[in-house]
Amino acid sequence: AQTVTQSQPEMSVQEAETVTLSCTYDTSESDYYLFWYKQPPSRQMILVIRQEAYKQQNATENRFSVNFQKAAKSFSLKISDSQLGDAAMYFCAYFDNFNKFYFGSGTKLNVKP
Amino acid sequence: GAGVSQSPSNKVTEKGKDVELRCDPISGHTALYWYRQSLGQGLEFLIYFQGNSAPDKSGLPSDRFSAERTGGSVSTLTIQRTQQEDSAVYLCASSLVVAFALHFGNGTRLTVT
């Protein structure tokens, strides 16, 4: 079975600084999708960014970008110019060819003013 | 509706009672997922629907758990003879087509006393 590992249970960043959240996954597939989701205290999961494995170019959404290393099975999220509203749990997710999403255990991001 | 709607938002029940959790996906979304999130943990896959059929029920923890979806829309997750270990937040998500981003509801927090 595919697994998604987030090795950082909790991280802190100063407001306006940059932080990188790590994610690795295990798969034998060549075609799949990767996602980062944010879960603020309100509990609702919000999509941050999506990456197709067949695309070499790293996805970017405003202050959020990823470093996708397919051979290393690594998918890290970089948040630039961190804002207080970025404080949340961040989950990395893998989507396979059998229509199932696998989620990591999450990284809690604290943003210090 | 504008988003995925789940009801109730909170449910407290006595051990041994049955509960029904409801999910109203975004109109037109064919895929629907149920996940369970225990306190401070990641998301545990329960079941996935494509239309009204459930190709993958492998995540249901026991035969006390069942789910159905009618009319390709509303889904109900039923837990019979609830146990204290069933206490968690139950999240529902839908997507327009597979491999697209999941849209999550706010979840139902179930507490079994």
Image (tube, rainbow, N blue to C red):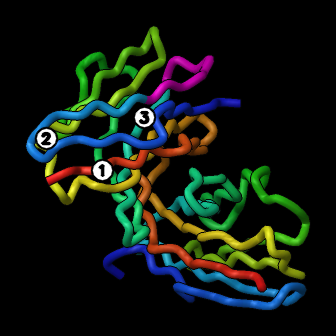
State the image quarter where residue A58 is shown: top left
B112 to the left or right of A55: right
**What's the chain of the residue with tag 3?**
A
Q: Which residue is mark 1?
A: A110
Q: Quadrant of the N terminus of chain A?
A: top right
Please name which of the two marks, 3 or 1, marks the residue nearer to the observer.
1
Q: Earlier in the sequence, mark 2 or mark 3?
A: 3
Characterize the local packing of mark 3: few (<14), some (14-19) or many (20 or more) Cα atoms within 10 angstroms. many
Q: Nearer the viewer, residue B7 or B97?
A: B7
Which span is picked out in magenta? A23-31
Q: Tell me which residue sits at (85%, 85%) in the image.
A: B15
Q: Tell me which residue sits at (27%, 29%) in the image.
A: A66
**What's the chain of the residue with tag 2?**
A
Q: Tell me which residue sits at (62%, 17%) in the image.
A: A28
Q: Tell me which residue sits at (79%, 50%) in the image.
A: B58
Disc on res. B22: none
Q: Nearer the viewer, residue A9 or A71?
A: A9
Are the two marked residues, 2 and 3, in contact with CB atoms closer than 8 angstroms? Answer: no
Q: Is A24 contained in the magenta span?
A: yes
Q: CA distance from mark 2 to mark 3?
A: 18 Å
Q: Amino acid at mark 1?
A: Asn
Q: Earlier in the sequence, mark 3 or mark 1?
A: 3
Secondary structure type for disc 1? strand
State the image quarter where residue B89 is shown: bottom right
Across and down, in percent, residue A98 comes to 63, 38
Q: Which residue is mark 2?
A: A63
Q: CA distance from mark 3 to mark 1?
A: 23 Å
